[in-house]
Image (cartoon, rainbow, N blue to C red):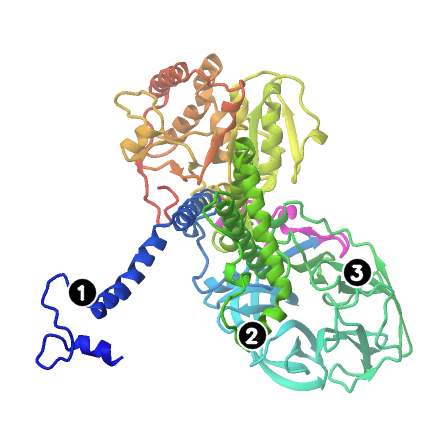
Amino acid sequence: MDHVGGYGGAGGPGGGGTSCRSSSCCDMTVKCSCRWRLEPHYHFYNRLFSSGFLFFSACLVLLGSIATLYGWVTFTPSSFRMGLSSSGCQEDNEGSWSIGIFFGDSPFSLKPIEAVNVWKNETAAWPVANPIVTCASLSDAGFQSNFVADPFLYIQGGTFYLFYETKNSITLQGDIGVAKSTDKGVTWQQLGIALNEDWPLSYPYVFEYLGQIYMMPDSIKKRELRVYRALNFPLQWKLEKVIMKKPLVDSSIINYDGKYWLFGSDHSGFGNGLLEIWHSSSPLGPWIPHQKSPINNIDRSVGVRNGGRPFFYRGNLFRIGQEAYGRRVHIFKIEALSNDEYKEIEVPFNFIKPEKGQNSWNGARHRHLDVQLLPSGGWVAVMDGDRVSDGDLVRRFIIGYASITGAAFLIVLMGVLLGLVNCIFPLNWIVHSSGKRNVSFMAWERSNLFLIRFSSRVNRALTSMRVKIKHSTCARRLLLTVIFAMAVGLVCHGVKNIYGGNGSEAPYPWKGQYSQFTLLTMTYDARLWNLKMYVKHYSRCSSVREIVVVWNKGVPPTLSDMDSAVPLKIRVEERNSLNNRFKVDPLIETRAVLELDDDIMMTCDDVERGFNVWRQHPDRIVGFYPRFINMDSLKYRPERYARLHKGYNMILTGAAFIDSQEAFKRYWGEEAKQGRDLVAKYFNCEDVLLNYLYANASSPSSRTVEYVRPAWAIDTSKFSGAAISKNTKVHYQFRSNCLVKFSQMYGRLGPKAEFNSRKDGWDL
């Protein structure tokens, strides 16, 4: 070391070493220092631009682009979802529960409100449809909620009060909300939060006793069953008494045979909880356990836990139970109830399960039913429902990230097979160090011997596979193509589960209410394959109530040939005419009609947005294909001409919402006869005629059309030879002729409407 230090002092007097005056002489200290500084940078750039790194970077960019494109095409833009509070209606692992209302002649023949055909002009709900209360109802009223469930009715005179559990979006615990209806359940006013505590509340069982109104909600976390008394009904409540020191869930009280009976399930055990019964002379206690409590039913998965208020019907007492937790409700007839005896049997409950799956507000499950007898002798009921199953959010995230991980593994496998990656598992797991190993490393090696051997065998197998397929170009290309396709599929599947929501295409409320419409299409025998695909797809859209098929030519199909989730009607016409599209049909049960050609496929969400816009402007034609007609030249042109002029004054009714009462009446009025004759002559222009009739019935400055841009739309007629307007040039010439004739008959079209004039951006 002293010798080296002498070199460091060379050149100075008394340096004690060989003096280096030549420029070729190299200072080894400087050389080693330079090498130390340059080597890390050399290895860094070598790794940065290695073939393996470039391969993984290219795959990341490519798969990321594919995932982005897939999301753009498939998912509903967040800006489309309107009417929801920014802090309410968040995705929740417990579900997205809503509440619906039902009516019937008995508790066993209940029909949803839309089947009763109640119309509400103020909200353009013709008819009003379930659900009646959602998280949006409460969030829009200023009370942020993720979901609403466990509904109970309290009827006071002609006023309905609805109590329910609402999960607070901020505290993430259950509170008790309340709403009021003065029109027999058609519209609801959110009054606010009736009861909240420092622990979660649910199942707000409300009852009357000695002129006082009481509420008995679940307080599982508190491990008590509490009864509250109304000080100022329905928003002010005071704790009256703790009637039981047990974590009971879904507890209900019923007055039967001169006694009060308490039904509940102890939540401290596992599973759904066995039914327990107590009796007392007062709903405030003291409570005496039933001699056979807990009640051990034959099938523990059915009808154990309460699912709503017990009720009397034709002198018999019935109890509502829920299957497991939140799947569906069952009704049990109580055949014996005394201090020492209890017997119940399940009775049929013909609740029609929705066939639209996640697009129905209760398509996945329902768990709670409250039925009550009205003074008129009819029955009313409220029920909660969910479009997804319990734990859906966590399950989607697990599946999503597992899919992404699987795609990453396949990309590494591709790299190995291409020779760009040497191994899948790090070599330092496998290669034994030739140097001295410490005790801790040897202990790790012994404890992970299986992992080391497994990694070694996998790497050897992949190396062997790479050598084998290297000599077979076709096999190599095929294998790499299959692996990459699988990676793309896994990435798309992962993105869908992580970012795509629960997969439902829910309807959009207008002024807090939902409604339904009729889907109408006109077709003939040569387009039957289109029709089958059309019916299967659109019948699953949330707001579609029925589908009417106007059959213009050929032998009509049988209803059994169609896979429809809603009622399907086929109206066979004697004459093949485009005028049949707007014929007055008394069998149509809704005011809103979506005229949609059978060769147009778009998402249910696009359809729901169009319906929402039409409910805002029911006096307009609301559709998805805009056109601009220059009234000075009267020449028919495609959509790009409207885009060029930044506006439109016509909507094609091959995909448009109209008011069936007004539109059909105008089209078949006496003043439209000349126009109908021209349509019959050209076998064209029926949609152009309807636009002129709307403009003719309005003032010159009134807007008569509204555009909604679909996320995507496919014209399936291009895949067949059955398109009506295959020759575009001839088709456009006919329409230009129609424009001239209709302008002479009915005057000008309405004023031009600009694109992107809506605040929600739906008309970009």
- Left/right placement of residue 60 relative to residue 256 reads left
**Image coords of residue 60 (percent x, y):** 42, 49
- Left/right placement of residue 64 relative to residue 483 reads left
Q: Which mark is residue 340?
A: none
Residue shown at 30%/21% (left/top)? 634
**Separation of marks 2 and 3 at Cα, in angstroms:** 29 Å
Q: Nearer the viewer, mark 3 or mark 1?
A: 1
Residue 342, image quadrant:
bottom right
Residue type at mark 2 is Ala
Magenta: main secondary structure equals loop
Residue type at mark 3 is Ile
Q: Which residue position holds label 3? A: 331
Give the camera-side residue of 451 and 516: 451
Q: Which residues are magenta?
A: 104-133
Residue 178, image quadrant:
bottom right
Circle 3 sits in a helix, a strand or a loop, which is it? strand
**Image coords of residue 5 (percent x, y):** 21, 78
Q: Which residue position holds label 1? A: 26
The earlier-in-sequence mark between 1 and 2 is 1
Residue shown at 54%/19% (left/top)? 722
Q: Which residue position holds label 2? A: 194
Circle 2 packing at 10 Å, graded few (<14), some (14-19), many (20+), is some
In the displayed structure, 440 sits above or below 682; it is below
Residue type at mark 1 is Cys
Is residue 175 shown to the viewer in this render? no
The earlier-in-sequence mark between 3 and 1 is 1
**Image coords of residue 22 (percent x, y):** 10, 64
